């Protein structure tokens, strides 16, 4: 989950300043997000996708301020 | 239940920490009835008004208020609000109301990235709500704030709607009562400190009126917020049940 592009990310800004101070190349547009892993007990990919979509939309991300993306991996 | 006293329900989530202050103000300072409603309860026990107090429900995990919103009691709070019940969310309570979709917008991390704990001045932008009836329009009052995520944000369309419908109830101001960046403790859009829903029965606010109610603490501007709610509930909730002369008298006083 990451803050939507239109929203100022003060944490990202602070890290950007720290990167500047580190003296490492030209780095900009730092955005900070959250990473979540979970197991979906489904055999059909479509069902797993629906469940994941639901979890993201209803709980993990607040669509007013955040975007989300996900990857499914079969175990 | 007395005809001239209302019952406040103070919801307690794991991590709420202003629940006892709120309960104390309702009961001891204002002389009303108050009950704690544990987040796992599924019954509001007939209270006249619900208060979601400040704190750090569920340790602010994921996002402030995001987990609390799924507590069993919140189903009842949402239903109560839909039926026109009076709901006040203070600080973390405001965050929960936003996450629950009872109010529009979100509260982002403070623009300063710092936890802000100090007194602020707010201007009463709308004094014809059931929460602010005893304030004067445009009056500047003092409340404490204490939060890390109080930076109100919403999309331009919603903001325009909030303005058009007088849904921004308090705005942060400087000492002179002017809406300026200096008076804004957290970077909120247009200095928004409190938002009410379109129906006018759900208010969310970052400042803490319960910390500005006991004279011992040196501030009493918050009392009138609770007194407005009490007066409204006596006239409108109790009035329906009692229909005696007393309600008439109170209505005339107002």
Image (cartoon, coloured by chain):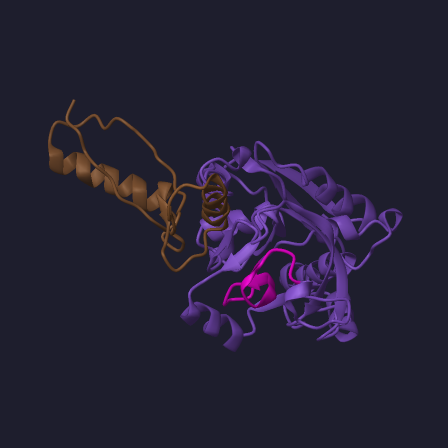
Chain colours: A brown, B purple
Could you tell me which residue is drawn at 75 percent across and 47 percent down? Answer: B26
Q: Is residue A36 above or below residue A10?
A: above
Q: Is residue B9 visible?
A: yes
Write the start and end of the magenta stretch as one range.
Answer: B184-203
Q: Is residue B159 above or below residue A64?
A: below
Q: Nearer the viewer, residue B70 or B236?
A: B70
- Is A20 left or right of B125, judged from the image as shown? left
Quadrant location of the C terminus of chain B in the rendered image = bottom right
The tally of labels here is 0
Q: Position of residue B106 (x, y in %)?
A: 48, 55
Q: Position of residue A1 (x, y in %)?
A: 35, 43
Residue furthest top as drawn: A75
Q: Nearer the viewer, residue B135 or B207?
A: B207
Q: Is residue B39 visible?
A: no
**Residue B247 is one of the magenta-drawn residues:** no
Q: Position of residue B92 (x, y in %)?
A: 58, 45
**Residue B187 is one of the magenta-drawn residues:** yes
- Is B151 left or right of B241, judged from the image as shown? left
- Is B20 left or right of B197, judged from the image as shown? right
Residue B124 is drawn in which quadrant?
bottom right
Could you tell me which residue is drawn at 59 percent across and 46 percent down? Answer: B148
Q: Nearer the viewer, residue A56 or B179?
A: B179
């Amino acid at each position: 989950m990451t803050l939507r592009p239109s929203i100022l990310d003060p944490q990202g800004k602070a890290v950007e300043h720290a990167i500047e101070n580190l003296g490492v190349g030209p780095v900009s547009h730092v955005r900070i997000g959250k990473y979540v892993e979970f197991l979906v007990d489904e055999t059909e990919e479509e069902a797993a996708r629906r469940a994941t979509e639901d979890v993201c939309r209803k709980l993990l991300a607040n669509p007013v301020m955040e975007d989300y993306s996900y990857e499914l991996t079969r175990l | 239940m007395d005809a001239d006293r209302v019952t406040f329900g103070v919801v307690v989530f794991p991590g709420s920490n202003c629940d006892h202050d709120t309960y104390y103000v309702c009961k001891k300072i204002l002389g009303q009835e108050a009950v704690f409603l544990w987040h796992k309860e599924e019954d509001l026990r007939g209270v006249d008004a619900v208060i979601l107090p400040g704190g750090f429900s569920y340790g602010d995990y994921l996002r402030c208020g995001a987990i609390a919103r799924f507590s069993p009691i919140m189903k009842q709070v949402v239903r109560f609000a839909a039926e026109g019940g009076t709901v006040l969310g203070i600080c973390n309570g405001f965050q929960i109301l936003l996450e629950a979709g009872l109010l529009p917008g979100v509260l982002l991390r403070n623009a300063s990235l710092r936890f802000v704990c100090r007194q602020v001045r707010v201007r009463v932008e709308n004094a014809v709500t059931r929460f602010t009836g005893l304030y004067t329009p445009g009056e500047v009052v003092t409340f404490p704030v204490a939060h890390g995520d109080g930076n109100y944000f919403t999309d331009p369309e919603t903001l325009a709607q909030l303005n058009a419908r007088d849904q921004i109830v308090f705005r942060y101001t400087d000492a002179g009562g002017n809406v300026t960046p200096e008076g804004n403790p957290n970077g909120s859009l247009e200095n928004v400190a409190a938002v009410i829903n379109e129906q006018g029965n759900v208010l969310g606010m970052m400042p803490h009126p319960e910390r500005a109610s006991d004279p011992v603490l040196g501030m009493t501007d918050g009392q009138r917020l609770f007194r407005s709610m009490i007066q409204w509930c006596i006239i409108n909730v109790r009035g329906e049940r009692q229909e005696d002369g007393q309600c008439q008298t109170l209505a005339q006083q107002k």
